């Protein structure tokens, strides 16, 4: 028996070694194929990022007066004559952080709900389904700057068609400044963003629905399960991976939002995002160091979200395995 076990070990070990060598060769080949792309990525994105981080540690300015001096973390937080100064002590920065997170939470939540509903409708069979699918994608195909400008004209308080329609219906008594009123500007920005990016959610969820097996639905139909229970117990768990990916991508995109808010409300304090705040410091105030610090914090925030997603994904996969 010992002799037979020894023979089996000798037979298995070369096979395991061969598999290990093959996996090693595949890993080396993969890294070789990725090397050109990684080099381009480092040159295009890595160098500007490092420059931004370096500028955030200096008093650089667009005025060009003198050479930038290294000031450490003074742009982030410093104590000057008994008073805290810097980005982390600036209430305008924290207002921009709050606006950004509020915008991301509200817009992404609405887009997930509407995208799921639209995807379920488009997944059903009805006459003209192809035409409706193409029409749904039109807002996503329009450039963000163009769509934001169009909505800016439509929401104008003097000649905007939205106020004109609401006045004719008797829903409002006077024209509303949708993008200038602090109580309405965030709502307006969110609605425009929802109109623009809901097709993305719809497309992602619809692609997941197209891949679902029909056996589960046939069994549920035979058992007399209600459509609502079918959705919660079959459809939603099966499309959850695709839904999570779509939510992550949209959340990261919403956290760095700039164009739609800037076109609609410019530097309005009630809607200013972190990206707009950084742009204001860099361009309007010409403070490269302070603006770079804001940009660096925004990058670190998004990088942290990506890292958390990857860690949680690995933990979930390890639990499933």
Image (tube, rainbow, N blue to C red):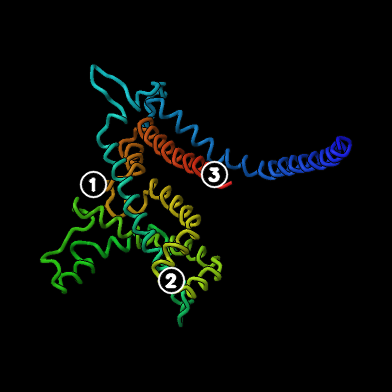
Provide residue 269's location: percent of width, then percent of height.
24, 44
Please name the residue that numbered disc 1 is placed on: 270
Q: Are marks 3 and 1 in contact (CB under 8 Å)?
A: no
Q: Are marks 3 and 2 in contact (CB under 8 Å)?
A: no
Q: Is residue 193 above or below residue 292?
A: below
Q: CA distance from mark 1 to mark 2?
A: 47 Å
Q: Residue at x 31, y 27 (%)?
A: 86
* Mark 1 vs 2, N-terminal side: 2
Residue furthest bottom as drawn = 127
Please name the residue that numbered disc 3 is placed on: 319
Closer to viewer: mark 3 or mark 1: 3
| Residue 101 left/right relative to 207 | left
Q: Are marks 1 and 2 in contact (CB under 8 Å)?
A: no
Nearer to us in this view, 212 or 104: 212
Q: CA distance from mark 3 to mark 2?
A: 30 Å
Residue furthest top as drawn = 81
Helix, strand or loop under label 2: loop
Q: Which mark is residue 106?
A: none
Nearer to us in this view, 288 or 134: 134
Q: Which mark is residue 225?
A: 2
Q: Quadrant of residue 277?
A: top left
Helix, strand or loop under label 3: helix
Closer to viewer: mark 1 or mark 2: 2
Provide residue 273's location: percent of width, then percent of height.
32, 45
Provide residue 167's location: percent of width, then percent of height.
15, 70
């Amino acid at each position: 028996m010992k002799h037979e076990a020894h023979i089996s070990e000798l037979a298995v070990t070369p096979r395991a070694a061969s598999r290990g060598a093959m996996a090693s060769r595949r890993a080396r080949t993969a890294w070789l194929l990725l090397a050109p792309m990684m080099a381009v990525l480092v040159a295009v994105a890595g160098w500007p990022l490092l420059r931004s981080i370096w500028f955030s540690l200096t008093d650089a300015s667009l005025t060009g007066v003198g050479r930038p001096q290294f000031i450490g973390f003074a742009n982030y937080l410093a104590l000057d004559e008994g008073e805290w100064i810097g980005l982390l002590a600036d209430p305008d920065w924290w207002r921009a952080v709050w606006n950004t997170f509020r915008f991301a939470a509200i817009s992404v939540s609405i887009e997930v709900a509407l995208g799921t509903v639209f995807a379920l409708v488009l997944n059903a069979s009805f006459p003209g389904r192809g035409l409706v699918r193409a029409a749904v994608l039109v807002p996503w195909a329009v450039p963000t700057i163009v769509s934001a400008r169009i909505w800016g004209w439509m929401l104008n308080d003097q000649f905007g068609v939205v106020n004109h329609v609401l006045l004719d219906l008797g829903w409002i008594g006077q024209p509303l400044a949708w993008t200038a009123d602090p109580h309405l500007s965030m709502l307006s920005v969110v609605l425009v963003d929802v109109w623009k990016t809901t097709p993305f959610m719809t497309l992602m969820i619809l692609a997941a629905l197209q891949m679902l097996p029909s056996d589960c639905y046939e069994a549920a139909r035979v058992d007399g399960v209600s459509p609502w229970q079918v959705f919660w117990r079959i459809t939603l768990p099966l499309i959850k991976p695709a839904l999570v990916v779509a939510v992550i991508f949209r959340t990261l995109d919403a956290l760095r939002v700039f164009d739609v808010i800037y076109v609609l409300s410019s530097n309005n304090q009630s809607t200013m995002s972190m990206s707009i705040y950084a742009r204001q410091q860099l361009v309007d105030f010409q403070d490269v160091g302070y603006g770079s610090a804001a940009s660096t914090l925004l990058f670190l925030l998004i990088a942290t979200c990506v890292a958390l997603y990857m860690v949680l994904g690995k933990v979930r996969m390890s639990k499933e395995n």
